Amino acid sequence: MGNTDDILNDIRGQIDAHPEPLAEARKRLDLVRSSATGFPGALRTYRSGSLPQNTFIHPVGDGDGGVVLDRRVYPRLGPDGGGETPADITKELCALLGPAVRKVYPNTRCGTSKRGPKITFGRPVDGQDPTVDLVVALTRREGSGLWIPNLETNRWEASDPECHVELFTGGPLSLRRTRRRVVRLTKAWNKQYGQPGFSSHNLTVWAWEFVEPGMGMAKALSTVLTKAAARVEAGEATKDPAGVSPNVKLLVERQVAARRLRTAADGVAEALAHDDDRDAVLSALSRVFYRYVDAPASNSLAGKIAALRQTSPVTTVTLGLSSPATAVRPTRAYGDTGQNA
């Protein structure tokens, strides 16, 4: 194992989800899914997102899933029926889920997120209180996938979350393991910014597209960042791998997204180019994973940047400035699109 892999493993130790809240998130999603099977017209439930894909990072947030309704029971619901919007059916499902889940978690509340009921539990585990987002989905008359709500616009949209899980968890064990690690690392990199540039789904699609069998973790991470940067720089779209939803959207302006990706890709490539020099690798990766890696003290410029990352003020003398000694308050505004984009 080279220095790049070694340091990336150190980062993984900082970002991987803790076992107890992760297990609790699975338990809560299973409970909500079980409760949802009692809803009239429920055909099946499913898990989606980070839980079945094993890509959660610390802290554990939403456990995602869905309940699929038979549109024949709701002939007026959705684009294939009478055009009824998802707002009312979501309220009806909440009315079932809240009392059912409160039998196990008395502090449960059922509100809504973009796609359906959002259940909060009021019982932290290891300082984390995982929630559950349950999509209210309808079978489609034509085409694959499901109709799922967009409660922000009170409309239905086509998607295939069950196919996504099947795709993203497919392949040989070694490929799945590398892909999961790359997704977790890119999630941690992305979340360093106050305004992340990419959805978790976007990062997962890129890992699914670009990681190939036989790649080690460092090479796979470098490949994903480099190919994603080239795509965004060229203005090319990332398509839904299930072929149902519209193209995957960036969360920031394309130029900002491209700059972030290129900076990260260059940093990992530099680390691999100097893999036998631990200080050089630390210096390169500290520019990518700046919340998790400190540059070596021997790197004077990087050392000054690292000093500014500390929680206590540093002086202008420490930074090598010629002005009279003055305390400089450190700033770690990871989402500032000016300094950190």
Image (tube, helix red, strand yellow):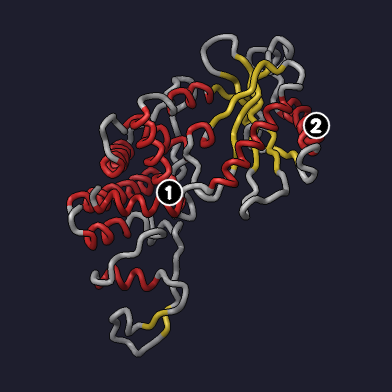
Quarter of the view holding residue 228: top left
What amino acid is found at the position of numbered circle 1 in the picture?
Asn
Picture quadrant where residue 293 is located: bottom left
Q: Find numbered disc 1 in the image and state the secondary structure of the residue it sits on.
A: helix
Residue shown at the point (44%, 65%) measured from the top left: 332
* Badge 2 amino acid: Ala
Q: 10 Å neighbourhood of mark 1: few (<14), some, or many (≥20)?
A: many
- Tell me if I can see residue 179 in this picture: yes
Q: Position of residue 336 (x, y in %)?
A: 44, 59
Q: Tell which of 189 and 7 is nearer to you.
A: 7
For marks 1 and 2, the one nearer the N-term is 2
Q: Where residue 253 sits in the image (x, y, percent)? A: 41, 45
Residue 99, above or below 279: above
Check the image and report above or below for 281 versus 211. below
- Per the image, the residue denoted by label 1 is 190
Residue at image location 37% in from the left, 29% down from the top: 173
Q: Is residue 55 left or right of residue 32?
A: left
> Which circle marks residue 95 in the picture?
2
Rendering coords of residue 124 (x, y %): 67, 51
Please state, as top left, top right, bottom left or bottom right, where the C terminus lies in the image: bottom left
Which residue is located at x 49 percent, y 21 percent?
A: 163
Residue at the limit of the structure toward the bottom, as seen here? 324
Does 2 appear above or below 97?
below
What element does badge 2 sit on?
Answer: helix
Residue nearer the viewer, 333 or 309:
309
Q: Is residue 130 left or right of residue 144?
A: right
Q: Position of residue 19 (x, y in %)?
A: 54, 46
